[in-house]
């Protein structure tokens, strides 16, 4: 049976159609509204017309594509497999596509050529190529176009000197940092039900001196999210929240950040927009008209009170308790600013610790508190502890260490890590510390239950001779695919 990732032909607008849509939207940007959010009637679409457009988009999809859209929008996890031979084949195909683009005088590859000249290893690294292949569902041609445009965007925003460098907070100007610190774009500390990162945009917090300040801030936070391989594999969900007395419509900000976003190696699997002002509906119809079919079928608009919109988001697998909102629906920025401070400290110290931006769904979080214990990876970890509790109580000292080590290896086998929190970031701990934490968990459980070795001696036992040699069980086989050799052995991949 073929274990290759599903390759789906991306449908949507052609290049000419895309240009026409951009011109149409830019025309909307120039409209002088007669009142707040007012759009001329000839630019509006009725709800019936929007429904017809959506139905037309869905009817043009194959059954497999419709299933994928449904899974993307509703946060239904799917197994991600990346066989090494398949990955190597696609990287070679992408390299050929890039070579072909360089030889085509009709294509603007100047920024990419400069990147190759400046730091060939950076621009051609397997890590970079993998990120773009994942973003375009392993379509080498689309990935090549996106990669070339990526360097155009980076050159435009940051200049030649930073073209082949990892963008850090220290590279941002004073005005860039102010735009970043407002919290108008925030990366949530939790993933959705399918393990996807969630990037929230809140127009009511927008403050910037020039539009490039905002675009640089967006570039930084989006590329930070992509440092995690899990985010590249599973994709990103975009959530817009524009509610309350400070709600705002900044069409230029929306359009320019979306143009930047389309050049980054981000696979957007779902888009949601929450609003509470009926007068914004015409603007939503324009947005849906120009976004193209591929995005439109993955877009959901939610109109209503903040609590109603949050409930709607929860039905799509989004953890509403992690949203940066107060009880009455107002914006919060405390965690965001803590996270930024932690990022600055990490970048300044150039820490050798392996950092995780957002804990993965299968990771084990070390610490206390209800949010940690409710994390899916911790719940799965406790199932393993339940399984081995009896054997651990009956084991001798050396055997106890073997059991603890076996549990650590089991977590690694299903692509999980043991993480400790350091401020607003997470750090992967080594196996020795992880094993100590497992042993401590067993002792804590024993104390809490009052269980003793004598009490467990009458219970069914696990054969201790197999500890340390046992391979993955069918219980563990449901998890995402194995790590790649060479190009994908670590979580942080984009330099």
Image: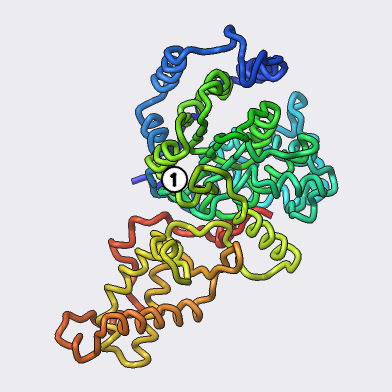
Query: x, y (%) of residue 439?
Result: 40, 82
Question: Regarding mark 1 in the picture, which secondary structure is present there?
Answer: loop
Residue located farthest toward the top when viewing the structure as drawn: 42
Residue 374 lies, with reference to residue 154, above or below; the image says: below
> Which sits in the foreground, 172 or 433?
172
Residue 90: image x %, image y %?
55, 43
Q: Residue at x 19, y 88 (%)?
A: 455
Residue 417 image point, x, y percent: 48, 66
Q: Is residue 396 above or below residue 168?
A: below
Is residue 412 visible to us here? no
* Residue farthest along the left direction in this orientation: 458
Figure label count: 1
- Identified at 41% across, 54% down, the residue is 480
**Can see residue 397?**
yes
Q: Which residue is mark 1?
A: 318
Please identify the quarter of the rendering in which residue 38 is found. top right
| Quarter of the figure with residue 446 | bottom left
Quadrant in which the C terminus is drawn: bottom right
């Amino acid at each position: 049976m073929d274990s290759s990732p599903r390759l789906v032909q991306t449908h949507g607008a052609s290049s000419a159609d895309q240009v026409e849509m951009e011109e149409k939207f830019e025309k909307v940007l120039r409209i002088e509204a007669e009142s707040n959010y007012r759009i001329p009637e000839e630019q509006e679409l009725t709800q019936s017309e929007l429904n017809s457009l959506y139905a037309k988009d869905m009817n043009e999809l194959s059954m497999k594509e419709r299933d994928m859209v449904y899974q993307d929008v509703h946060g239904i996890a799917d197994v991600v497999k990346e066989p090494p031979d398949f990955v190597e084949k696609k990287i070679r195909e992408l390299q050929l596509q890039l070579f072909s683009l360089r030889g085509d005088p009709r294509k603007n590859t100047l920024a990419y050529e400069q990147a190759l000249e400046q730091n060939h290893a950076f621009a051609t690294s397997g890590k970079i190529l993998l990120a773009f292949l994942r973003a375009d569902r392993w379509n080498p041609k689309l990935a090549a176009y996106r990669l070339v445009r990526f360097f155009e965007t980076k050159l435009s925003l940051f200049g030649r000197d930073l073209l082949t460098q990892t963008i850090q907070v220290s590279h941002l100007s004073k005005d860039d940092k102010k735009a970043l610190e407002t919290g108008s774009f925030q990366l949530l500390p939790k993933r959705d039900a399918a393990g996807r990162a969630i990037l929230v945009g809140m127009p009511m917090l927008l403050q910037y001196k020039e539009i490039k300040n905002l675009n640089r801030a967006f570039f930084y936070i989006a590329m930070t999210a992509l440092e995690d391989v899990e985010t590249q594999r599973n994709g990103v969900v975009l959530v817009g929240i524009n509610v309350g007395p400070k709600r705002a419509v900044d069409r230029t900000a929306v359009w320019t950040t979306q143009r930047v976003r389309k050049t980054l190696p981000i696979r957007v699997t779902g888009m949601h927009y929450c609003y509470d002002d009926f007068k914004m509906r015409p603007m939503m119809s324009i947005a849906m008209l120009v976004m193209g079919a591929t995005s439109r079928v993955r877009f959901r608009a939610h109109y209503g009170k903040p609590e109603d919109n949050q409930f709607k988001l929860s039905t799509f697998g989004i953890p509403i308790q992690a949203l940066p909102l107060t009880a009455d629906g107002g914006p919060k920025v405390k965690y965001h600013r803590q996270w930024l401070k932690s990022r600055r400290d990490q970048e300044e110290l150039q820490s050798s610790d392996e950092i995780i931006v957002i804990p993965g769904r299968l990771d084990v979080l070390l610490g206390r508190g209800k949010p940690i214990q409710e994390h899916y990876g911790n719940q799965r970890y406790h199932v393993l502890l339940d399984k081995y509790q009896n054997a651990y109580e009956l084991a001798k000292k050396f055997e106890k260490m073997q059991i603890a080590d076996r549990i650590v290896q089991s977590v690694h086998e299903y692509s999980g890590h043991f993480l400790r929190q350091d401020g607003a970031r997470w750090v992967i701990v080594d196996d020795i510390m992880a094993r100590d934490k497992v042993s401590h968990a067993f002792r804590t459980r024993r104390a809490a239950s009052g269980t003793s070795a004598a009490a467990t001696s009458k219970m069914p036992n696990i054969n201790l001779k197999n500890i340390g040699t046992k391979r993955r069980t069918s219980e563990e086989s449901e998890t995402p695919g194995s790590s790649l050799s060479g190009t994908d052995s670590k979580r942080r991949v984009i330099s």
